[in-house]
Image: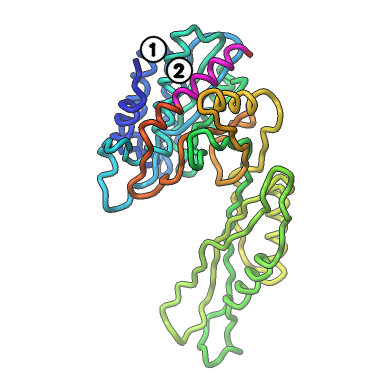
Amino acid sequence: MIDPVELAKALIACPSVTPADAGAQDVLAAALEGIGFTVHRLTFGAPPDGPVANLFATIGSGSPHFAFAGHTDVVPPGEGWDAFTPRVDDGWLTGRGAADMKGAIAAMAAAAERAVTRGFRGTLSLVITGDEEGPATFGTPPLLAWMEANGHVPDLCLVGEPTSSVTVGDTIKIGRRGSLNAWITVRGVQGHVAYPAQADNPVTRLVAILAELKGCVLDTGSAAFQPSNLEVTDIGVGNTATNVIPAQASARLNIRFNDRQRGADLEAWLRATVAAHAPDATVEVRITGEAFLTDGGPLPALVAAAVREVTGVEPVLSTTGGTSDARFIRRLCPVVELGLVGATMHQVGEQVRVDDLATLTDIYAAVLARASTT
């Protein structure tokens, strides 16, 4: 039988920093093929953001079609630890990806084996990308397109992101805010600081732009979402001299927005605000996801019931946090997220409790048992 701890350790041992795979999907494919899954290996893209290894594994036929989704890529390890040598000490599994989210993928595989052994009715799939922590260009979007083209559209999907706060299962993500990144470049005229009339300082206009943007209250939240917020994430001039007015100044910002906003409307607002202060400025905008909510339907209730069955905990249904590949999957089918405790994700010394891996496997198995009867 698949041991989720041993499988998690084998996955962690692969240094799969985006977009490298480093053998992680070979490990997963071998485990899934060993229990009867048909595994499709799909590689998309080219440098610098690719190539990206992706995996689609499926077993069974007909409805319901339930899918697990996740990613085998991880963020860079940071300094001060042996991130890709997994170890178990005092009930903790330590290694890069333990929480985000190789541990959850191992739990998915172990739960899938139980479901197959017990006779899962319908189709069971795993949708795994190697590009969630990166630009997500050659990962889930083209993988979903391939699934659509080949008749593999799920009815329900659970993403194994580390959603839990204190105990496994205490938080289920039923939606996410949208995300927009913008790069603003204001051009001026370089000159001597003692003769400002002979120059045009772009910093002055950039500061005014950012002040107006930050001073705007986008909204006060909605029934399911916290307020939208705009954060300036970088300001640059590149001026090494103390007595020179620079020729240009730039800034980068991010907006996390709820279901009261749309990316295109926010882009138009940004461009208009910038143009009012600096008509010749350039604005580059990248919308990486719209806000979405899986409200109602069987999936949130099904997953919450599985959590209660295994842990006795009443999970919170939440839309907080960052983005995930659920923003793409929601186009195909209802999707929620449930995974391990995420307190140490992306940190040096990332770790999860060994007992939590067992609990998550039990929850995923209970989800599959309930899905098989829908």
Q: Quadrant where the N terminus lies?
A: top left
Residue 124 is covered by the magenta coloring: no
Badge 2, how many Cα within 10 Å: few under 14, some, many 20+?
many
Vertical arrangement, residue 22 with respect to residue 250, above or below? above
Say whether residue 139 is visible.
no
Q: Residue 121: x and y, percent?
A: 55, 8
Badge 1, how many Cα within 10 Å: few under 14, some, many 20+?
some
Q: Residue 304: x and y, percent?
A: 60, 28
Please tell me which residue is depicted at 34% across the width and 30% down the height of the picture.
Answer: 8
Residue that label 2 marks: 112
Nearer to the camera, 129 or 115 = 115
Q: What mark, if any, has residue 142 been given in the picture?
A: none
**Amino acid identity at mark 2:** Ala
Disc 2, SS: helix
Disc 1, SS: loop
For the view shown, which residue lies furthest in the front direction?
A: 312
Vertical arrangement, residue 234 with respect to residue 43, above or below? below
Q: Residue 68: x and y, percent?
A: 51, 25
Please tell me which residue is depicted at 73% across the width and 51% down the height of the picture.
Answer: 265
**Amino acid identity at mark 1:** Ile
The part of the image, by quadrant, that contains residue 276 is: bottom right
Decide: marks 2, 1 in contact (CB < 8 A)?
yes
For the view shown, which residue lies furthest in the bottom direction?
A: 194
Residue that label 1 marks: 35
Magenta region: 361-373
